[in-house]
Image: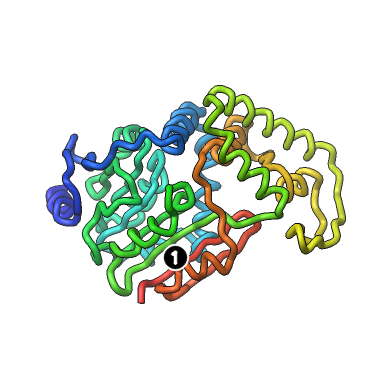
Amino acid sequence: MQKFKKMIEKILNQQFNKIDNNFFVLSSSEDFSQTTKTFSTKWEYVDKIDEKSFSKYDDFQKSWFLKLYGFETESVLKNFLKKKKIIVDAGCGLGHKTYWISKLAPESIVIGIDISNSINKARLRYKRENLFFLKGDIATKFLKPNIVDLMICDQVLMHTKKPDFTFENLSNTIKDKGHFLCYVYRKKAIPRELLDDYFRIESSKISNEKMWEFSKQMTQFGKYLEGLNVELDIPEIELLNIKKGKYSLQRFFYWNFLKCFYNENFKDDINDSINFDWYSPQQAKRYSKEEFLELCKNFKILSFNEEDACYSSKMQKT
């Protein structure tokens, strides 16, 4: 562990307090924003979900991660990580993905950073000599420039106060020819966007308890719609950005009007946390394809994944 510890002390750009062998708190780690509190609450809830249910969700997330960033298999990802000396997972939450990466890349130093209280659970749960956790804000210049071989910002960037500014800060830490894996929310149909924007404002006035109650109601509503087993054949409505196609009733509501997430493969508590994750944070910027590509203009796009919910890309710094 000593070689990794010496390395991490050299790459940090800020004052930090070493709490124990694998955990550091940056001097800029205090953030009392609504979004940070929301994710602290969310991860505390998720951490209490039974192990079997969470494991199933974790497996889904890993498989989706491979798809998002153009890795056919876990072995392909492992081979990609081989020569990456410094890997950062910016916005690591409970750290399960960070831990997975650290096992796939045992010779790399792997750093998970998060501003929410989830980082405290991550550093106690996951112990490997090459794995470290930092409590701090990914929007700040917490690392020295041109030092990271692989930056991962998966499902996080849009929740920062100024996502474009955060993207630039993270980009500046990456070495020439280094890699960036990044995910952003995609803009959806106009009615859905308007309602989502409304909730960005109103969520600050609603207690976490009420937001959890609302999130559970959205799960049950989605479950009810899916259970009706109705298929719609919808024509394109270009001005509302509603796409032509065949939808279940739940999917039509979901993509065009109201996020009522429901996946029958997950238990309700997982579905509840996903609905909470969407509705509760005040910061949740969405991008058009053109806007995301403009954000990535200083990178060479190695793979680009486009889904109804998101855009994601594996990029190399030029």
Label 1 packing within 10 angstroms: few (<14), some (14-19), many (20+): few
Q: Position of residue 35 (x, y in %)?
A: 45, 38
Give the residue displayed 43% in from the left and 48% down from the top: 160
4 over 218 or under it: above or below: below
In the picture, measured across the screen, residue 222 lies left or right of residue 140, that is: right
Q: Position of residue 316 (x, y in %)?
A: 39, 72
Instruction: Answer yes or no: is residue 23 visible.
Output: no
Disc 1 element:
helix
Please name whichever residue, 101 or 117, is drawn nearer the observer in this view of the structure.
117
In the picture, measured across the screen, residue 274 lies left or right of residue 2, that is: right
Q: Quadrant of the C terminus?
A: bottom left
Please name whichever residue, 92 or 60, is drawn nearer the observer in this view of the structure.
92
Amino acid type of the residue tagged 1 in the rendering: Val
Instruction: Answer yes or no: is residue 154 visible.
Output: yes
Please name whichever residue, 159 or 121, is drawn nearer the observer in this view of the structure.
159
Q: Quadrant of residue 29?
A: top left
In the picture, measured across the screen, residue 92 lies left or right of residue 106, that is: right
Q: Quadrant of residue 315?
A: bottom left
How many numbered dots are placed on residues in this image?
Answer: 1
58 over 311 or under it: above or below: above
Give the residue displayed 55% in from the left and 28% down from the top: 205
Q: Position of residue 270 (x, y in %)?
A: 58, 34
In the picture, measured across the screen, residue 313 lies left or right of residue 8, that is: right
Give the residue displayed 16% in from the left and 39% down from the top: 18
Q: Which residue is mark 1?
A: 76
Please name whichever residue, 238 or 20, is drawn nearer the observer in this view of the structure.
238
Give the residue displayed 35% in from the left and 32% down from the top: 121
User: What is the image's colouring?
Assistant: rainbow
Q: Position of residue 64 (x, y in %)?
A: 54, 54
